[in-house]
Amino acid sequence: MPLPQPNLYPPFNIVRLSHVEYRVTDLAASRAFYVDTLGLQVTDEDDTIIYLRAMEERGHHCIALLKADEASVGGLGFKVFDEDELDKAAAWFAGQDLPVAWVERPFMGRAFRTRDPFGIPLEFYCRMDRLPPIHQKYKLYNGVKPLRIDHFNMFASDVDASVAFYNAIGFRVTEYTEDSESGKVWAAWMHRKGGVHDVAFTNGTGPRLHHTAFWVPTPLNIIDLLDLMSTTGYLANIERGPGRHGISNAFFLYVRDPDGHRIEIYCSDYQTVDPDLEPIRWDLKDPQRQTLWGAPAPRSWFEEGSVFEGAALVASELKAQPIIAP
Amino acid sequence: MPLPQPNLYPPFNIVRLSHVEYRVTDLAASRAFYVDTLGLQVTDEDDTIIYLRAMEERGHHCIALLKADEASVGGLGFKVFDEDELDKAAAWFAGQDLPVAWVERPFMGRAFRTRDPFGIPLEFYCRMDRLPPIHQKYKLYNGVKPLRIDHFNMFASDVDASVAFYNAIGFRVTEYTEDSESGKVWAAWMHRKGGVHDVAFTNGTGPRLHHTAFWVPTPLNIIDLLDLMSTTGYLANIERGPGRHGISNAFFLYVRDPDGHRIEIYCSDYQTVDPDLEPIRWDLKDPQRQTLWGAPAPRSWFEEGSVFEGAALVASELKAQPIIAP
Amino acid sequence: MPLPQPNLYPPFNIVRLSHVEYRVTDLAASRAFYVDTLGLQVTDEDDTIIYLRAMEERGHHCIALLKADEASVGGLGFKVFDEDELDKAAAWFAGQDLPVAWVERPFMGRAFRTRDPFGIPLEFYCRMDRLPPIHQKYKLYNGVKPLRIDHFNMFASDVDASVAFYNAIGFRVTEYTEDSESGKVWAAWMHRKGGVHDVAFTNGTGPRLHHTAFWVPTPLNIIDLLDLMSTTGYLANIERGPGRHGISNAFFLYVRDPDGHRIEIYCSDYQTVDPDLEPIRWDLKDPQRQTLWGAPAPRSWFEEGSVFEGAALVASELKAQPIIAP
Amino acid sequence: MPLPQPNLYPPFNIVRLSHVEYRVTDLAASRAFYVDTLGLQVTDEDDTIIYLRAMEERGHHCIALLKADEASVGGLGFKVFDEDELDKAAAWFAGQDLPVAWVERPFMGRAFRTRDPFGIPLEFYCRMDRLPPIHQKYKLYNGVKPLRIDHFNMFASDVDASVAFYNAIGFRVTEYTEDSESGKVWAAWMHRKGGVHDVAFTNGTGPRLHHTAFWVPTPLNIIDLLDLMSTTGYLANIERGPGRHGISNAFFLYVRDPDGHRIEIYCSDYQTVDPDLEPIRWDLKDPQRQTLWGAPAPRSWFEEGSVFEGAALVASELKAQPIIAP
């Protein structure tokens, strides 16, 4: 099944991925991880929820940590261009027979909740409270010095179907892995904001959130985080890396939060704003697509992910990913 | 005179700045500078012209070095979204009584030349030959490891007028310097592609090109270039830096090519895709806007620039920039 | 068996490790690896041997690559303080009933060959041809930008015995791993020149050379080497890393040359010149001693090494190292 | 006047520079600078004195900040090899008719105070309280992440005389600047511990302390400090840099403490343990000796320094340093 043609004139204008709601079982433990270790900044908090932003963000939050009995993902947020585009988005989802519910959100303007056809809870909005810049308040930089939220990566039981849906709403494939035996797309990276991706999908039991990624200045910040985590009780939370991905060319590290939600620390991918940028194809049999330098990923990285609130899991029909490390 | 309201629905869709034609007096000397020292890659060359691209670019060229009797700038190139947008752009310029001439360009599709109202020669196109990716051919990386062209910076005799014009075609101000005495904008940074700028304007005798900037991975690449230039006969070509700009927050270095054309090496500004991103105002009296760390710039940096072919110079009516270094 | 007391007043004064002779089966392949990939500089070469130095070294060579039918290590070189110390060294080895043979070496003054009691071929000298500095000839920097040879690491079948011998000639333990079950030293790091080590010994079938290490400026140079090797046909030569050692606190990468000789790229250990510097003890059961960040090393790293010319192998009586990765 | 022959067999064995006593007028302001901004660690403090160490140091302190009515330098400390060497040192100074006074120092063993022939107060000792390692307690790293004290740099009214004296006690010249007109040494860098210097002397009204230097991991730590200082009220304390010295090849930054004491942040010089390492000569007319990249130093850097307690100032007879920046 070939890639769909890029949809350069989508039905509404999504600017970028924006925020994620993580449901967590111990707010204090999550705060120690996201704030004291990763270095995200608290913008609001009480006994039930903590809002965080990264250093160059002026929107109110990119993560909401919600106290819950069980860990899950409440939803993925996307910013659209303006109020008109928000209405067009709501109309489009309704036209697809997908649920559209307008919701009240603190620190945000009008917003609606929906789900993609696979059950992933999505939230669209155009206005969030704007906060004063802190990117030059260097005294606040801490941990890995996270600059901004970069992307969501999800397990999908039918990646071709996911690509088709997100392509329909304007996400464009920049790189993809093809399973040359089945002829199907094994994984795809799709962007709106001009980097390698805002969202990515990988074959597996889905829908589940594989990780949320944050952009940092240089690989040395990632080394600093490894040193910090490995000497402050977070050794077991380091899952994979550091390394360079073949796909995206980014330098990466994967860590797990206290509930197991996976966070990628990420830097140095490339600009993708040209509408005629050709997607780069990788073969599933090429191990350098995952790690340019050849080091294998652990089994947990291939298998574990965060469930979305209210989404039923479906196994993939494709054969299991060849695991190259225990 | 206040900033104009951002024009979020411009008459045509410019994707990004794209390329510059530098007219140079000694092709071999220019090649030694741009290729052997900066590390740009030759994509085509003959006795009269050299085409160059940076490491992550797939368009055919970002610089054309044209052999000429006198150094100047032949024009600034911009990529538009598609053929329709190209026609809309041509129609818009014609509607402004600005010259529109369709030109044949090697390695490019349809293109037209025009000038902005101040005389800057501009070139618009939507298709350029696409080359295979080289961003993972690490053996080719050399010099400062330039990744992509980032922006043009120009002297303008009336910055408010320049801002109004470029705002009309969709460039949005991200940061600006105000001369609080005159109430006028002294300098402005305006973007299309989601960084701090594609174009910037600074008060001075204009129009002249102050510099073209290239994006590099980290500040250490800039330190490598300084070490290389200072030990290979290019010491006098190092003009200013390294340092961090207050405006844009970028780490920078300014060097001069053999004809005096100024190149900025640049990294670590921030993402600006939010349509409601508030422009950051700086006061002309604040020296940290130029160098966050306080080191002064040399006089040449404030005064010298490259003339545009065929553009008449006009002095600014604003009082001279307070020079803070010799 | 406790560590021996540091011998602060040794019988002769060794300044530092100096050079290694690698016997290699294909000089052209070795040159491509050491010169074109790692970036060492050729100081002399013919059809049978290539001499190399690193960027800040002024002695003639730190590696000699000698054409041979089988890969092995010809010997390890050490520089002593002056001619008197050289004679004292020869006398001391003779007094231990170890072989002392004065040899003629190109590019070197007087030198003698001996073996340690375990069979490792050693070479002592005080004068080697001095070459002009190249550390500020930045045009020559290439590959991983190796600055200087840093240390030798060896498998020893009885680490306590090796420590006792090298302690007797003035090497001082900075860090060590104790097998708390047997009470024996599993591994030890010993220095002369003021870093964590000039020589190290690890339990295993010995004597064999585990690796020779080179010092580089920053972790980013190591990342550059990984990118280069993984895209120029050397992917399979990347064995372990990047990572940070618990022991030594250094950032590291292990690569294999075309004959399998192992090279460590190394930076950021610490200064050890204080004579009362306390050795740091690690427990064999602590996996962070090897990799602070927890990533396991591959089996080859624990088992494979280069044989020394003319040295008989002896298996260790200690139980095998617990392997923590395939 | 030529350089003296290196004195490889000095009358006693100095291991390294060790500590400095800064007399400061406001302990709280000094603490904010050294601890909260530079990132040195407090090892002891009361209302009159603060002791500090850097991250890889295990000796009790490298700086003592002593509350005083006027800013000055109380003395420079050096560690000798053992008790015998300490006695030999005391005897040697007494033999030169220099004052020797045994003193009681908290956190230290036996120590004596003396002065060099030019009046600089010196302190020698061999044992200081040893503290547990903190170099892997990454949570403590802060500010510029200072690893260790590196060197002292002093103004001397007769550099040839200073070189002769420190050469007599075993410091060896690694690099020097010659005033080719007068034939005299303008400046010299002299080491004990295996780097480019433990002490350096520059022509000027002396004796005064030009600066104390701290070693940091990479140039990026220096960039971090610049960002921090320029946004936390220390902009005026940034005096010179960042840059690379021609002499020593080190990457540097000079900052001033609240009393004007100058601190250099320094990394990436080279290893100098070879006893036959040839000193590198620079000509006073070569501006790259100071800054390889050509940027001038400010006038204050050439003229200002900290007075030593009890030392009479003497002007140099050499003509003033050619100032190349305001």
Image: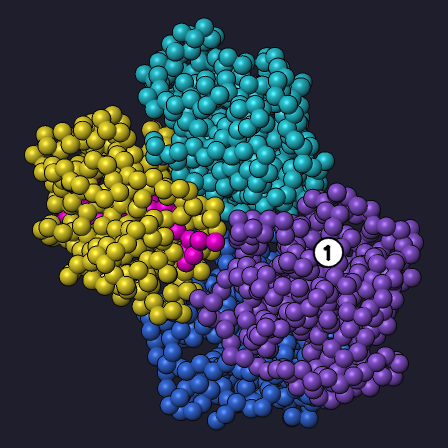
Chain colours: A purple, B blue, C cyan, D yellow
Q: Is residue D140 magenta?
A: yes
Query: Which image quadrant for residue A152?
Result: bottom right
Position of residue B75 measured from the top left corner of the image (x, y, whole percent): 60, 75
Residue pictured at 48% horizontal, 93% vertical: B1
Q: Is residue B3 left or right of residue D132?
A: right
Position of residue C113 measured from the top left corner of the image (x, y, whole percent): 47, 13
- In this rendered view, identify the residue nearer to me: D213 or B200: D213
Q: Dot 1 falls on which chain?
A: A
For the residue carrying disc 1, how many other residues have a C-alpha within 10 Å: few (<14), some (14-19), or many (20+)? many
Note whether residue D73 is visible: yes
Please give the residue where the numbered disc 1 appears in the rendered image. Answer: A247
Note whether residue B233 is visible: no
Position of residue D152 measured from the top left corner of the image (x, y, whole percent): 27, 47
Residue pictured at 68% horizontal, 93% vertical: B95
Residue pictured at 34% horizontal, 67% vertical: D234
Specify the farthest residue to the left.
D97
- In this rendered view, identify the residue nearer to me: D81 or D8: D81
Residue C326 position (above or below residue B280):
above
Query: Which image quadrant for residue C56?
Result: top left
Position of residue C17 measured from the top left corner of the image (x, y, whole percent): 45, 27
Quadrant into which the C terminus of chain A falls? top right
Q: Is residue A73 magenta?
A: no
Q: What's drawn in magenta, residue-wise?
A: D139-163
Q: Is residue C85 left or right of residue D142?
A: left
Residue C133 position (above or below residue B258):
above
